[in-house]
Image: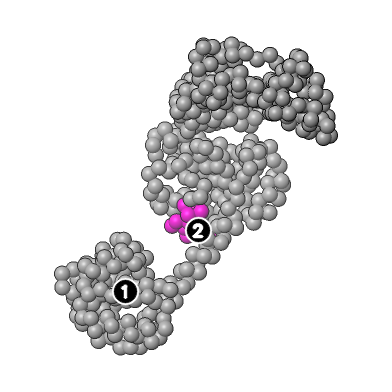
Amino acid sequence: MYTLLIADDEPLECDAIELLVVRANLPLRVVKAKNGTEAVTLAKQFDPQIALLDIRMPGLDGLEAAQLIREQNPFCQIVFLTAWSTFSYAQKAIRLGASEYLVKPVQRKEVYDLLDRLIAELDQKKEDALQQKQEIRAVLNLFSREFFAALKYGRITEEAMRSYFSMQGIQTEEGIALVIGGLKEEAVESFFRQSRTWGKLQLSYFISIDRLTVLLFSNQSAKILEQIAGSHQEPNITIGSGLPFSRLSEIPYSIATASVAYTHAYKKNLPLQRYSEVLRVPMDRKTLFNLSVHMLKASIEGATEKARTIAHELIDCSLLNCDTEEQAREELFELLTVFSYEIHKAIALLDTVAVPKTSVMEQEMYLMDLIDVSTKAVQADRADRYQRSFDFVKQYLAEHLAMPLSVEDLAKLVGLNSKYFSQLCKTYLNATFVEYLTKVRMEKAYQMLGEGGFTIREVAEKTGFTDSNYFSRVFRQYHGKAPSSLKEHE
């Protein structure tokens, strides 16, 4: 069902056309306006697909109304009805993109022929849009992190790539890589459908916190970029395009160059940057070190996107400025080791993981994970200074129940004064430290005894009790039954 707006200052004209629509059982809902001003208001309210507008109306005439309707609904099919068949009117109508220009009195056959044609065009557009949407969905393909990393660093053979993309319905081996910031995953489909005239679209993508990396398969890369540049209006979206690839083995370099272009666009606040237009200046060790310093500063400030963007620039520059990947790997190992040391010194309670030396691919994954964890910790501390410390306390107690544990030990671990730590326990553990520790030990003991396979002495030792008789007394007091009662049910 479509909406037909009829605007005429003569009510009988509106009623006559509405009657024709009803008699022919056309798939149209009719909305009537008595002048141009009302027509604009109703167009905004009902969003009509077809508008029949009388040109000569008091106040706002049909031409003026059409212009305002066109601004708010550029796809509305506008037809002018008038008894004044003059060249100037026809010229203005054509300029406004009118679908038809009919002179009154309009014959019934003319109305039917016109509406049948416009409805057929609307049906075809709907079918084309549905087909286009189905085509895109059929080839939208989200990479896993591991597969994308292997693809980016050339760890997959050309045959394996060909087989993978073939299973996704992608047969062409030409295309281009794009790195896009500010585009949400749910908007990928609509973004690439806008202003598209290059036929069936085939793409695969990988999304991370700060960017979307897209492989767009087509033999019309230049045309695609021009159309994307022409239709790209969103102020918060930044695009970097790499060098086109003509075979699958060139995909890693296309991704790398797209990343460089994106970094340039991000830093210069540009909507789109082609790698071919980026002035590439070789970077020495001092410049790379400075990048790592800026990355550290952004991470300590909790600026995830900024830190990740610098991290990508660091990785890209290392690869593009070193003769071999081995040299880049050694360069990055040194920089990341310093970065890791400084980040752990600045942000407490982060898990320590050694910097990998195996490959740049592993180093990139390590770096991005470290940035994500550290910036998330900073943001959490900013929201609540002590929540993360007590999350650590809970995890530590659960994993070290067999050890002798005291307020002083845990306070020291999280860097707090023991007296102040005890006060905070009531807020973050809803109990004193001793009460909470007893609760965790007793619940663990109950679980172990219920599962079977352990003696009471073994359970006591594993939950931090050196005296099994004392353990039994505490267990009975906490659970209201003896630990032996659970053993009897085995």
Does 441 sit left or right of 73 as displayed?
right
Q: Earlier in the sequence, mark 1 or mark 2?
A: 1
Marks 1/2: CA distance? 37 Å
- Residue drawn 76% across and 14% down? 467
Front in this rendered view, residue 71 or 42: 42
Identified at 50% across, 35% down, the residue is 260
Q: Secondary structure at mark 1?
A: strand
Q: Quadrant of the C terminus?
A: top right
- Label 2 sits on a secondary structure element that is loop
Looking at the rendered structure, the kind of residue marked 1 is Val
Identify the colour scheme used: one colour
- Residue 245 visible? The answer is yes
Q: Tell me if residue 270 comes above or below residue 246 in the rendering.
A: above
In terms of image quadrants, where is residue 83?
A: bottom left
Q: Position of residue 258 (x, y in %)?
A: 52, 39
**Mark nearer the viewer, 1 or 2:** 1
**Residue at horizontal 50%, vertical 67%?**
128
Callout 2, which amino acid?
Trp
Q: Callout 1: 10 Å neighbours few (<14), some, many (20+)?
A: some
Which quadrant of the rendered structure holds the N terminus? bottom left
Name the residue: 53% across, 60% down: 133
Q: Is residue 133 located in the magenta-colored stretch of the structure?
A: no
Q: Position of residue 293 (x, y in %)?
A: 48, 20
Residue 295 in view: no
Q: Which residue is mark 1?
A: 31
